[in-house]
Image: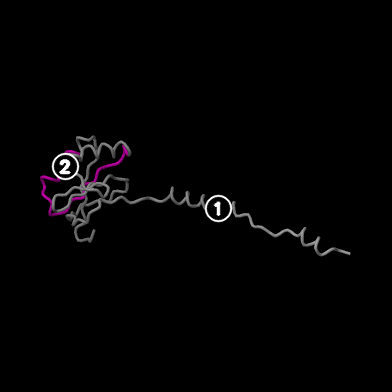
Amino acid sequence: MINIRQARRTHKTAEINISPLIDLVFLLLIFFMVTTSFVKETGIDVQRPAASTAQLKEKGNILVGISKDGLIYLDRKQIDIRSVRAHIERCLAENPEGGIVVVADKATRTGLTVQVMDQCRLAGAKNISIATSRAGGSE
């Protein structure tokens, strides 16, 4: 005859090991983080001038924003015209192949835009562009 007390002691409860599941979730998270492309923005909203010869650039760029009030932005932070060169040098050290895109409002003074482009050139940038919207298009 089987002793009931002894049968209860030897009965093991089923356990689910979730360690492989957690490993899989972390691997998927890392995969999606690596394959996702991040969009950099200047941190300001500008009205771009229209150009009928505007071209789309696919390569990763360093964006410098200039507001209509003459404020300069890089990586969502306001910077002074005197520090543009140092910031661009740092960005080019991180991304040597990156081009500079100046995103200036259409009401921005031309002289300030030229100063920013000059500072970018002095920082060692080879490829400097001005962001525009297509003529007849919205952006």
Q: Residue at x 17, y 43 (%)?
A: 80
Q: With 15 as the anchor, is 38 left or right in this view?
A: left
Cα–Cα span, label 2 and label 1: 49 Å
Q: Residue at x 18, y 49 (%)?
A: 66
Q: Quadrant of the C terminus?
A: bottom left
Q: Is residue 98 magenta?
A: yes
Q: With 26 as the anchor, is 54 left or right in this view?
A: left
Mark 2: amino acid: Ile
Q: Residue at x 16, y 49 (%)?
A: 71
Q: Secondary structure at mark 2?
A: helix
Q: Residue furthest front?
A: 5
Q: Quadrant of the N terminus?
A: bottom right
Q: Position of residue 126 (x, y in %)?
A: 24, 37
Q: With 29 as the anchor, is 44 left or right in this view?
A: left
10 to 97, vertically: above or below: below
Q: Position of residue 59 (x, y in %)?
A: 32, 46
137 to 73, vertically: above or below: below
Q: Which residue is more in the foreground, 53 or 36? A: 36
Task: Specify the segment rendered in magenta.
Answer: 95-119
Total marks placed: 2
* Residue that carries the numbered disc 1 in the rendered image: 22
Q: Residue at x 22, y 54 (%)?
A: 44
Q: Secondary structure at mark 1?
A: helix
* Residue that carries the numbered disc 2 in the rendered image: 81
Q: Which residue is more in the foreground, 5 or 110? A: 5
Q: Which residue is more in the foreground, 93 or 21? A: 21
Q: Position of residue 137 (x, y in %)?
A: 22, 60
Q: Position of residue 45 (x, y in %)?
A: 22, 56
